[in-house]
Image: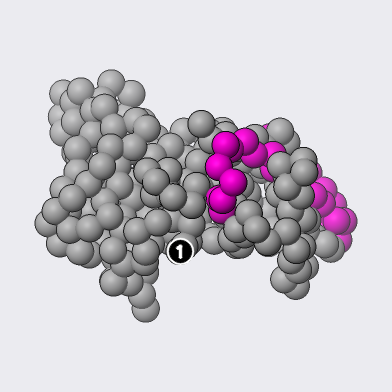
Amino acid sequence: DGGITQSPKYLFRKEGQNVTLSCEQNLNHDAMYWYRQDPGQGLRLIYYSQIVNDFQKGDIAEGYSVSREKKESFPLTVTSAQKNPTAFYLCASSRGQAVGNQPQHFGDGTRLSIL
Amino acid sequence: AQKVTQAQTEISVVEKEDVTLDCVYETRDTTYYLFWYKQPPSGELVFLIRRNSFDEQNEISGRYSWNFQKSTSSFNFTITASQVVDSAVYFCALSEAGGAGSYQLTFGKGTKLSVIP
């Protein structure tokens, strides 16, 4: 089945540690996105990528980094510079580069907590 | 700047009742897209509907219906004869049609719907 796979489902980070969240899609979508969701809040955009080897900062990129070396993969690294990383992280993809033309499809999310 | 407001934080209804989830948006663009997503307890967001700003026709899909009113900048979502499986957090979202904003969705904070058997 086509879809978006995020792993792991739960992740724990120690102080000063970088952690990487995986996002893989087999939908042949060009665009991919990372969102952060805090309790009682909507989703906020961290980074997005319209095409391989290119990505743009979203509203809350500080303390995060991404890469897009392959069309199907868009990993997110939460660095030690992110002081409040506890949140639910959602990855999404869309066929077209403009969101309005194509709806975004989401993965099941990764819940990150601090040890 | 774009903004989406979902004033209802939580709603509880008894099964088979109708319920309307409100969404009010702000944008300076004349062309834009509006979305509704459902987030069940499992966490993933499920796409429900997309409307463009030029199409103000109401839409019905089974028990779901959407009322888009440009004059009041609202895009409300009604569930008829609610069921326990409708229990979820529902998000309204907005995207511009062109420029840098066309690559981003601006989400409301969501409305948590609980349907009580």
Residue B31 falls within the magenta-colored stretch: yes
User: What residue lies at 43% left-to-right and 37% top-to-bottom?
Assistant: A44
What x and y, as percent, mark residue A2? 36, 75
What x and y, as percent, mark residue A93? 36, 59
Could you tell me which chain the residue with mark 1 belongs to? A
Task: Say which quarter of the image contains residue A36.
Answer: top left
Instruction: Report the span colored magenta.
Output: B9-33
What x and y, as percent, mark residue A51? 22, 58
Can residue A46 be seen here?
yes
Residue of label 1 = A102
User: What residue lies at 17% left-to-right and 58% top-to-bottom?
Assistant: A52
A13 or B57: nearer the eye? Answer: B57
User: What residue lies at 39% left-to-right and 46% top-to-bottom?
Assistant: B99
Disc 1 residue type? Answer: Gln
A19 or A61: nearer the eye? Answer: A61
What x and y, as percent, mark residue B74? 73, 44
Q: Return the residue found at the far right.
A: B17
- Image side of residue A13 versus residue A39, left or right: left
On-image quarter of the C terminus of chain B: bottom right
